[in-house]
Image: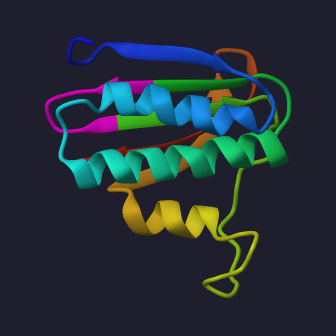
Amino acid sequence: MSVGQVQVWVLPSDLSAASEARRHVARVCEGMPEDAVYSARLLVTELVSNAVLHGRGTVVLTATRDTAGIRVEVHDESPDLPMIIDGPVLAEHGAGLRLVSALASTWGSSPRGRGQPGKRVWFTLL
């Protein structure tokens, strides 16, 4: 993958999507420090799992690597933007976005735009 090139994958809309997303992100992260690869795999798991469990429609993963790091986006067709839920650190549900917020350099969400239904949730690791 060349620097700045956007990679795009359509993921299955079931729980196998998270493992597929981890494999794709790991390939994009080749050559990055081991802790960054681990974080990217963990964070994409959280975002894709949320898209499958709480979103709807097609789940699309994009990843862009540049000299500074990586940006990962997960798109689904639900217009509902995610919110961080306060709760116990070890709660079974609701901790994913807190984890993304804690480990990512930056993260956010927005409507998809360009007439596409739904949202994108993204993070960067620099």
Q: Nearer the viewer, residue 26 or 112?
A: 26
Instruction: Tell me where the magenta segment starts and ends, as one range.
Output: 63-70
- Give the residue drawn at x 82%, y 36%: 78
Q: What residue sits 50% from the left and 60% below the top?
A: 100
Where 104 sits versus 67, above or below?
A: below
Q: What residue is rendered at 63% in x and 39% in y?
A: 18
Residue 52 in sight: yes
Question: Residue 2 is drawn in which quadrant?
Answer: top left
User: Does residue 88 appear left or right of residue 93 in this picture?
Assistant: left
Residue that extends furthest to the bottom in the rendered view of this protein = 88
- Whether residue 119 is visible, yes or no, is no
| Residue 50 shown in magenta | no
| Residue 42 point in image, percent of width and height | 48, 52
Q: Quadrant of residue 79?
A: top right
Nearest the camera: 114 or 101? 101
Q: Position of residue 114 (x, y in %)?
A: 64, 15
Q: Horizontally, is 26 left or right of 83 in the view? A: left
User: As drawn, is 54 to the left or to the right of 110?
Assistant: right
Asked if residue 102 is positioned above or below residue 68 in the image, the reply reads below
Check residue 64 for magenta coloring.
yes
Q: How is the image coloured?
A: rainbow
**Residue 116, horizontal then vertical, whole percent:** 73, 18
For the N terminus, which image quadrant?
A: top left
Number of callouts in the render?
Answer: 0
The answer to whether residue 24 is above or below residue 38 is above
